Image (tube, rainbow, N blue to C red):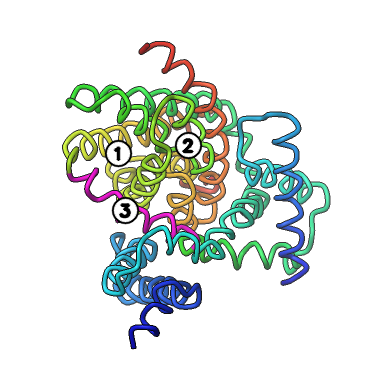
Amino acid sequence: MGEALDYLRESPVALMLVTVVGYRLGRELQRRSGGHPVAQPVLVAIVVVGLSLWALGADYATYATGSQFISFWLGPATVALAVPLHRQVHRLPAVLGSMLVAIPAGAAVSLASAYGLVRLLGGEPGLAMTMAPRTVTTPVALQLSEAAGGNPSLTAVFVIISGVLGAIAGPAVLTLARVHDRRARGLAMGASAHAIGTSRALLEDETEGAFAGLAMGLTALAASILMPVLVLVVT
Amino acid sequence: MITGLAWLLGFQLVGEVLVRVTGLPLPGPVVGMLLLFVALQLRQPVSHAPVLRAANALLRHMQLFFVPAGVGVIAYLAVLRAQAAPILVAMTASWAVGLLTVAWVTVLLRRGGADGRGADG
């Protein structure tokens, strides 16, 4: 029995199964709740996997190694965002100019406000730098955090929490703010909640998803240029 | 499906190599996305082309691929609890400010200022 349990704690098969089943439960909950915004499959799966690891007594490092086969597909899925963009490109010219102002403005406001608020509320400069790049897609956010003296693995956690927050609350906040243009909604979702926000946007509407994917890429570029400026200003 | 996956992986690989050769501050997959977009515009494949089907399949389940990274949150619960106030307030407020900045600037600067809900949106 003890041996079997040891196997389960470290087996990639068990870890993959828990992840896929957790995600499947999340999809089911999303469907049964009629697409309730809090029923994001990623959130349900994180809770299910977290509880399973705790019950099995497995640690996160083992899980991270065993679940690489799943995270791997984030890369090809990001490439795949070219497809909705391709189908929606005829809607791009009318917002191209405003988009090229809106994305850098959003990235600047987002970096500066995250840094400023953490400092204002008594957080260390290191925590503020760890927080600042959290709306950027993970690989770039990690590089930016590290270069600015932050903690990259904690940044990865903030990136995920921001994404889940955006997926849950983004569409409702945009509707409250009377933003009805599908393109503007999509750009805002992708700029503030990267690929997790994009996946919610895709579910809402293909135009929103296409512009969210585009905004995610442009935000990564804008933040890479603006983050060193923030570091210069505060030091 | 397999042909489509091969195309997606191929574009990602070209993106990864380009990023390393040029030192662009972008992830390889994002460059791969832009290259695939250009290729689709040039080739205009039919709607059931393998690359389009593989892309749709991956996009439908994109949230699954974030689960492993998301589980990392549990490894940092102690840190999150210790600094809960600055983390929660800064994260939520600056997220909302960023979201609304992008949305409002896009809407305000739009050519003609027409609402995009109609035939155009």
Left-right relation of B35 to A18: right
Ranked by sequence position, the earlier of labels 2 and 1 is 2
Residue occupied by mark 3: B75
Residue at 31% from the left image edge and 65% from the top image edge: A50
Q: Nearer the viewer, mark 3 or mark 1?
A: 3
Q: Amino acid at mark 1?
A: Ala
Q: Is residue B75 magenta?
A: yes
Residue A204 is at least partly visible in this image: no
Left-right relation of A76 to A187: right
Circle 3 chain: B
Residue at 30% from the left image edge and 70% from the top image edge: A57
Cα–Cα span, label 3 and label 1? 35 Å
- x and y, in percent, of residue A103 in the image: 49, 29
Q: Which quadrant holds residue A54?
A: bottom left
Cα–Cα span, label 3 and label 2? 19 Å
Q: Nearer the viewer, mark 3 or mark 2?
A: 3
Magenta stretch mostly in which secondary structure?
Answer: helix
Q: Which mark is residue A177?
A: 1
- x and y, in percent, of residue A74 in the image: 56, 56
Farthest residue, direction front: A3
Residue at 39% from the left image edge and 11% from the top image edge: A233
First to last magenta residue range: B65-81
Height in image: A13 above or below A206? below
Circle 1 chain: A
Q: Amino acid at mark 2?
A: Ala
Height in image: B51 above or below A142? below
Residue occupied by mark 2: A141
Q: Is residue B105 magenta?
A: no
Q: Are marks 3 and 1 on the same chain?
A: no
Q: Which quadrant holds residue A52?
A: bottom left
The N terminus of chain B: image quadrant: bottom right
